[in-house]
Image (cartoon, rainbow, N blue to C red):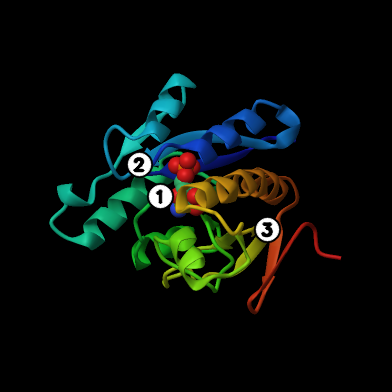
Amino acid sequence: MNATPVVVLVSGGGSNLAALLEAAKDPAYGVQVVAVGADRDGCGGVEIARAAGIPTFVCRVGDYTERAAWDAALADLCADYDPALVVSAGFMKLVGPGFLQRFGGRFVNTHPALLPSFPGVRGAQDALDYGVKVTGATLFLVDEGVDTGIILAQCVVPVEDADTVEELTERIKVAERAQLVEVVGRMAREGWTVEGRRARIGRSR
Ligand code: GRF
């Protein structure tokens, strides 16, 4: 079976990307990371990709006069690699309608909370502030909202009484990486279906 081509978008340290690249070393995993894109220079994720010999691109919002032009350029850069799936692995930008027209339904994002609780950029902090006893990570298909897309997978992480935001964030990230690797691999190998808001990974029965 041919590996499924995947473009990964990053903004940060790239630990999720690193986990995907590690998994993809095994041909049975079924994923080939064909390119890594970022919205900023010098982020760890791009360095990880370069070190692994994977093509990279940077597409900065500030280089475009309009957000829609950035969005179209980002979509063009991804399309150059003809991916079956685009994975946002800590990509800290919202894409627009132009990008979603081309990659909607096959653009996945991982969020460090159990959506629909605690969307946005402070997932771990908001969970701590609210006082929940469990939180987690959510993998979802990106739509036009902020963390509102169809949920593909979720995993639960306990909140400990003495947690700092750093400790909780790190515990979430460990679970999040494992989930991302497992589910992206299954999506690549087995496909997925969506009915209403309910997604099912794997071949339909
Ligand atoms: C992840 O926790 C992701 O959910 C959040 O940013 C983090 C990215 O981490 N949006 P990394 O860059 O993959 O280490």
Of the two numbered discs 1 and 3 in the rendering, the one whose residue sits closer to the viewer: 3
Taking depth in this image into account, of 75 and 53 the one nearest to the observer is 53
Q: Position of residue 127 (x, y in %)?
A: 51, 66
Looking at the picture, which amino acid does disc 2 mark?
Ala
Residue at 36% from the left image edge and 60% from the top image edge? 95
Mark 1 Cβ and ligand 1 under 8 Å apart:
yes
How dense is the environment of label 1, judged by Cα within 10 Å: few (below 14), some, or many (20 and up)? many
Q: Which three-letter amino acid code belongs to the residue tagged 1?
A: Phe
Mark toward the start of the polypeptide (2 vs 3): 2
Marks counted in the figure total: 3
Is residue 146 visible from the viewing direction of this image? yes
Q: What is the crowding at mark 3: few (fewer than 14 residues within 10 Å), some, or many (at least 20)? A: some
Circle 1/circle 2 CB separation < 8 Å: yes
Q: Residue furthest left?
A: 65
Q: Which residue is mark 3?
A: 155
The residue under the point 71% across, 27% down is 26
Q: Where does residue 117 sit, x and y in percent of width and height?
A: 53, 73
Q: Nearer the viewer, mark 2 or mark 3?
A: 3
